[in-house]
Image: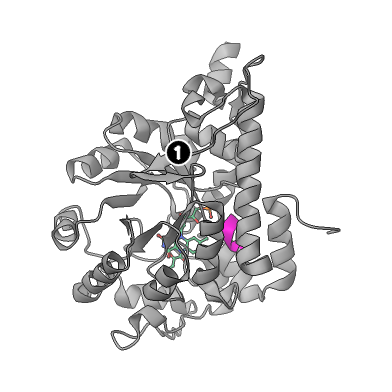
Amino acid sequence: MAGEPVNVNEFQELVRQSLPKMYYDYYTGGAEDQHTLKENVKSFRRIIIQPRILVDVSKIDTSTTILGHKTSAPIMIAPTAMHKLAHHEGEVATARGAAACDVIMGLSYMSTCTVEEVASSCNAVRFFQIYVYKRRDITALMVHRAEKNGFGAIILTADTPRLGRREADIKNKMIAPQLKNFEGLISTEYVSDKGSNIEALAAGTFDASLCWKDIEWLKSITKLPILIKGVLTSEDAIKAIEAGVAGVIVSNHGARQLDYAPATISVLEEVVHAVQGKVPVFFDGGVRRGTDIFKALALGAKAVLIGRAVIYGLAAKGELGVKQVIQMLKDEFELTMALSGCCSVDDITRSHVKTEKERFICRM
Ligand SMILES: Cc1cc2nc3c(=O)[nH]c(=O)nc-3n(C[C@H](O)[C@H](O)[C@H](O)COP(=O)(O)O)c2cc1C
Ligand SMILES: CCCCC(=O)C(=O)O
């Protein structure tokens, strides 16, 4: 590839050429046949934008408010594990990139920098994602550390009672490093004789008995707002509201858990309808373009989370790459707004997009 990357896919290509295969496969891969992985991206392509013309778009405002935090765009960094495998500065570089772009940083429970290191590195608004360990005392301690270090919300990832089957990780015998957050608390170094060591780590530590009633437990140990990540059906959206969460995240974990789960953009609207505006609905999965962000907002998302695209920026150029990827997505989103006749995020409505089904009905 000649010259600087001009879009997210070109960042990915840079990283493919430079990162050790074991890590590249871990970051890019999905579960089993990777059907959902492809669908997450392809389903966006089937949605068409319906622009409005002759609107004064000389001033565009992409900013929004997320759980009371003003941010420059409806973009957050999705919590993704082990950033030091992509760049030696790890999550500190990612957080600084987020701060430079004035977007919210989601920090993974499985981060390679500690909660304290990330908190003291910059002034980005931070949300902390958790898995619930069988050792609940350790998860409670992590929640308290996040609270003490000024994190603004807890994201409970609810789609991972066991790790999905990622075949590249099995073949590569993907490593499970000791994670600094848990030093002196629990070992996260696992060696599996079957292949993926991170699968063994999840099997050894994650609590597969976690269920809806445990939201009460989580609420009893923290005053922070709780977002539930992994909602794909109206049924679960209603349960989440009943459980008293502050928001839901429509996500299939970047297609790394259940293969043949729906592409997230195809179920966003169902969840939005079920939630009835009671709490914000966030979205992730397959976002690679500003037009994708626009489509998700038109279908009712308050904001999107970006997983792999940010990792590509980080792996390519550290903090600068994170900044460039987010800026690229923000610029593309702003241009999409301008060319669609939308001056603010509130101007983006359902009538600005047509799904494949709607286009099919139109033709009948
Ligand atoms: C390499 C990688 C690691 C991830 N680690 C976590 C994690 O630790 N916790 C979590 O809740 N989700 C994790 N996810 C899922 C992301 O939060 C997010 O749902 C997904 O990446 C969105 O899809 P996208 O990568 O297409 O943007 C991970 C995803 C990837 C690609
Ligand atoms: C045991 C590590 C899990 C990290 C994760 O969520 C992922 O790789 O998708």
Q: Quarter holding the C terminus? A: top right
Tag 1 secondary structure? strand
User: Pointer 1: what residue?
Assistant: 64
Instruction: Say left or right for 161 vs 71.
Output: left
Amino acid of disc 1: Thr
Q: Tell me which segment is drawn in magenta.
A: 309-313
At 43% from the left and 50% from the top, the residue drawn is 252
**What secondary structure predominates along the stretch shown in magenta?**
helix
Ligand 2 occupies quarter: bottom left
Query: Quadrant of the image for the N terminus?
Result: bottom right
Q: How is the image coloured?
A: one colour
Q: Magenta segment: does it hold 310?
A: yes
The reply, left or right, for residue 283 in relation to residue 183 is right
Quadrant of res 100: bottom right
The stretch drawn in magenta includes residue 290: no
Query: Can residue 308 be seen?
Result: no
Mark 1 crowdedness (10 Å alpha carbons): few <14, some 14-19, many ≥20: some
Q: Position of residue 200 (x, y in %)?
A: 40, 77
- The answer to whether residue 33 is above or below residue 196 is above
Q: Position of residue 124 (x, y in %)?
A: 45, 59
User: x, y (%) of residue 86?
Assistant: 59, 72
Q: Nearer the viewer, residue 331 or 257?
A: 331
Q: Observer-nearest residue: 327 or 315?
A: 327
13 to 336, vertically: above or below:
below
